[in-house]
């Protein structure tokens, strides 16, 4: 009887659907979540004026290969709109950091044939609405000249650190962040505490990209942190007299809600800058 039970269990395990095992193939994808990626595309998209005047609309699809470290080895246009629009799409694509492909849970190289390409849509009507919402057409250039390399620098490699652009009513980045963050109702209700840690890149435009959650806190705390941090504007990091891309981290501590007044986070020196 015992043997029959063991055999029955084995048969059940063998008959489980394949979806419960390691997925065979996962194509490379941006390190950003879909929502953060959408926000990134909206803030960084530049639709050349000449292309808009010529009614050049459509979706540019970029084919690419990625190595085991998530580095793009090659990229090319799979579906074209025009030379101007294609060039703008490639510039945007080159800012994205990638997670490598996986095969049965193992990180592997991905040739261009291993993914369907990356689409970037260009629609004149939607873009006109977008520039009204974000209040700029061309990307900001808070510091010139701009480095031509897409290399991402650590803060320790810079001659001058990025500087946040704030209204004069705020004395520091910490002052701004903690005046803007409100403890979510759900976190208050369930007494949620902890540290939200984000990594991101400050681009040469002073805008943020590749925002990634390294440590999360429940109850809406992580989402609250992202909402406040993602719209910050910066003077970019400087290396050898040029504006460059800079890797940064932010750590936001959510203290015990029982000790909070008005559900605001007390000011702390842990913004990561």
Image (spheres, helix red, strand yellow):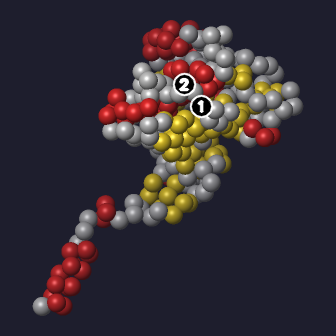
Coordinates of residue 167 in the picture (x, y in percent): 63, 11
**What residue sits right under mark 2 in the picture?**
178
Q: For residue 268, which numbered disc appears in the image?
A: 1
Q: Nearer the viewer, residue 108 or 198?
A: 198
Label 1's element? loop
Give residue 178's quadrant in the image. Answer: top right
Q: Is residue 11 above or below residue 98?
A: below
Coordinates of residue 31 in the picture (x, y in percent): 53, 43
Residue 230 in sight here: no
Coordinates of residue 130 in the picture (x, y in percent): 49, 14
Q: Is residue 22 above or below residue 71?
A: below
Q: In which quadrant is the C terminus drawn? A: top right
Q: Nearer the viewer, residue 191 or 220?
A: 191
Q: Residue at x 24, y 80 (%)?
A: 10
Residue 46 in sight here: yes
Image position of 145 (left or right of 72):
right
Q: Residue at x 63, y 38 (%)?
A: 249
The label nearer to you, 1 versus 2, is: 1
């Amino acid at each position: 009887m015992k043997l029959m039970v063991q055999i029955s269990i084995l048969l059940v395990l063998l008959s489980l659907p394949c979806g419960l095992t390691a997925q065979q193939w996962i194509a490379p994808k941006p390190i950003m979540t879909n929502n953060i990626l959408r926000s990134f595309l909206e803030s960084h998209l530049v639709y050349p004026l000449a292309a808009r005047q010529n009614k050049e609309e459509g979706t540019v699809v970029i084919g690419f290969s990625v190595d085991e470290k998530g580095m793009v080895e090659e990229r090319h246009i799979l579906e074209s709109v025009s030379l101007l629009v294609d060039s703008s799409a490639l510039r945007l694509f080159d800012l994205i950091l990638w997670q490598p492909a996986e095969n049965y849970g193992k990180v592997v190289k991905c040739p261009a044939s291993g993914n369907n390409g990356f689409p970037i849509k260009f629609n004149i009507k939607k873009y006109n609405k977008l520039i009204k919402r974000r209040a700029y057409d061309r990307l900001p250039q808070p510091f010139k000249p701009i480095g031509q390399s897409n290399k991402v620098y650590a803060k320790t490699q810079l001659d001058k650190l990025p500087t946040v652009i704030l209204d004069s009513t705020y004395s520091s980045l910490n002052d701004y962040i903690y005046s803007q963050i409100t403890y979510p109702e759900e976190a208050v209700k369930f007494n949620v505490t902890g540290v939200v840690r984000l990594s991101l890149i400050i681009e040469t435009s002073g805008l943020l990209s590749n925002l990634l959650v390294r440590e999360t806190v429940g109850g809406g705390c992580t989402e609250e942190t992202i909402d406040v941090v993602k719209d910050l504007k910066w003077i970019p990091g400087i290396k050898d007299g040029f504006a460059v891309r800079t890797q940064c981290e932010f750590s936001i501590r959510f203290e015990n809600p029982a000790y909070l007044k008005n559900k605001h986070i007390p000011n702390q020196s842990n913004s990561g800058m």
